[in-house]
Amino acid sequence: MKIKTNYGFFIIPTWPLLVVPLGVFALIMLLKSYYIVNPGETGIHLRMGSMIDQHEVSGAYFKIPFFDEVITINNRIIKSQIETQALSHDLQFVSIGVAINYKIENALELYKLIGTQMEENIIDPFSQESIKAIVAQYTAEGLIQNRHEAKERVERDLRQRLEPFHITLVDFNFVHLDFHRDFLTAVENKQIAMQSAMTAKNLTEKIKEEAIQAKTQADAEAYAMKVKRESVNKETIILKIIEKWDGVLPVTMTGNALPFLDIAK
């Protein structure tokens, strides 16, 4: 390349102008010619859409730039939170939040079945289906009283649904179960009424028990008075007989004296 100056023409070599772009292009190709699989991940190696390899061991691997693609799938325990609504057996709407922990057991087979959209295609719809199916078997009050049982049933049902897709359900929990305010008010009023009825019943039982105790005490006192009166009457009779006795024992026709009678009996 020639550049004209006041002193004539100055020649600049053209090869440095070519080296720089070629060097940048080579650097880009070098960076795109490998990929890294991190611990806890599976790398699925695709070439023009077809799978040619998978890597579960962490490290760097070679690929052909612009022709190869790498899909990375997480093999660690993944946490997902889902919000949904369900209808109870007595037609009460329930707003439900759940926390799900799951783990992918076979990334390659899962990728063949549904690709990489696990939560959108599997976790979310399956979870909602299991939740709605189980909640529909409980009344609203039954769901409150048997929350742990309902949670275990949903967990068992969801685990069975996920198993064919090579996903293991690690843990499932209800975060919240929210009911309509009118229902909660009705439940509260019912609880208050039940407590009032129980208090009244306890008071009635207490009064009945006190009445029984009072009658028992009265019967005991009356019996004691009767025994006391009979004792006093016997003593009075004996005293009168003693006062009237002249000291002579009755005599029989044969002349023998009769034995002294035990008049106290």
Image: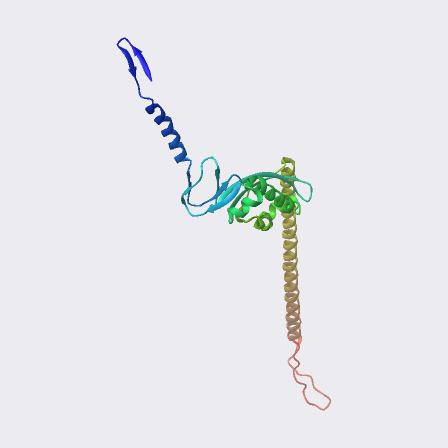
Q: Is residue 221 above or below residue 262?
A: above
Q: Residue furthest right?
A: 253
Q: Closer to the camera, 153 or 193?
A: 153
Q: Inspect this view and state whether residue 119 appears.
A: yes
Residue 145 location in percent, x, y?
60, 47
Question: Quadrant location of residue 11?
Answer: top left
Residue at x 57%, y 50% (from the top left corner): 163
Q: Closer to the camera, 37 or 22?
A: 22
Q: Inspect this view and state whether residue 75 appears.
A: no
Q: Residue furthest left?
A: 7
Q: Is residue 19 above or below residue 204?
A: above
Report the coloring of the rendering. rainbow
Q: Closer to the camera, 204 or 86?
A: 86
Residue 260 location in percent, x, y?
65, 82
Q: Closer to the camera, 46 or 173?
A: 46
Question: Quadrant location of residue 230?
Answer: bottom right
Residue 143 location in percent, x, y?
62, 46
Residue 198 location in percent, x, y?
64, 48
Q: Is residue 34 above or below residue 13?
A: below
Q: Is residue 5 above or below residue 145?
A: above
